[in-house]
Amino acid sequence: MADEPQPAGELVILGRITSINVRKVCWTADLIGLSYRTEVWGLPHRDPREADFLKLNPNAQVPVILDDGFVLWESGAIMRYLADRHISALWPTDLKERALVDQWVTWQGTELNPTWMYAVNALLRKNPAYSDSARIEDSVARWSSAMRILEAHLRQTGAFVANGRLSLADIVLGLSSHRWFSTPFDKPDLPAVTAHYAMLKATDAGAKYLGEATP
Ligand SMILES: N[C@@H](CCC(=O)N[C@@H](CS)C(=O)NCC(=O)O)C(=O)O
């Protein structure tokens, strides 16, 4: 239970692995080499509107972490916290390098992610509540336009999103690309995005978090 006392030093990740935001945190923790326990929360498993959970995150959303009793929510903040706490190169110490990683992590959460919501619910999850064809078209157009921004950037940088090496930005954008490729619709050709995604998918963590079971 989320409100039970934690063994000293324990890291718990609360969430469901089908959530893209939970996978961001698990992937980060794996790459840092942290040992952690997961507690499954989130629909359809366990409703985050339960009182116990709301005490941890009043937004009723996953992920949440408990790090030796310290409670934190918001996937981007959790990734940055874990990488900073354990001094990981995934979150550079150089101010400008770090800012570039932060730029892309923020962009993924605030600009890219909102574009796909309608299209993913309609085309991937096939939720009948999302059947307005004009809204699907609009979502696909905005999503494609955001992915073209990523494509143009990756064409310039080559293998990684920022600073020529793996960072938190690759994790979040790799998960975004996974959703892009998992959602069936007529997509523009994005070779640099495709190559970046394939490179991540070929890693152990990529194979774990970019699989068919978690689109
Ligand atoms: N901005 C939040 C968004 C979190 C979010 O949207 N979580 C979704 C899953 S991806 C959620 O908790 N949905 C309710 C549920 O799973 O029951 C973050 O990045 O952590």
Image (cartoon, rainbow, N blue to C red):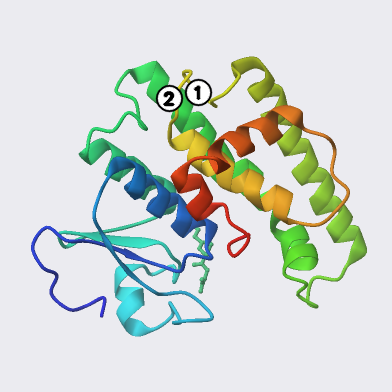
Q: Secondary structure at mark 1?
A: loop
Residue type highlighted by circle 2: Ala
Q: Earlier in the sequence, mark 1 or mark 2?
A: 2
Circle 2 packing at 10 Å, graded few (<14), some (14-19), many (20+), is some
Vertical position of residue 202 compared to residue 183: above or below: above
Of tags 1 and 2, which is closer to the observer?
1
Q: Position of residue 167 (x, y in %)?
A: 43, 31
Vertical position of residue 16 compared to residue 11: above or below: below
Beta carbon at label 2 within 8 Å of ligand 1 = no
Q: Position of residue 91 (x, y in %)?
A: 35, 31
Camera-nearest residue between 158 and 130? 158
On-image quarter of the C terminus = bottom right
Q: Which residue is mark 2?
A: 99
- Give the left or right position of residue 174, taking residue 27 as reference: right
- Give the left or right position of residue 92, taking residue 75 as reference: left
- Give the left or right position of residue 53, taking residue 44 as reference: left
Circle 1 packing at 10 Å, graded few (<14), some (14-19), many (20+), is many
- Give the left or right position of residue 155, taking residue 37 as reference: right
Residue type highlighted by circle 1: Ala
Camera-nearest residue between 78 and 167? 167
Q: Secondary structure at mark 2?
A: helix
Q: Position of residue 12 (x, y in %)?
A: 26, 63
Q: Which residue is mark 1?
A: 162
Q: Position of residue 6 (x, y in %)?
A: 14, 70
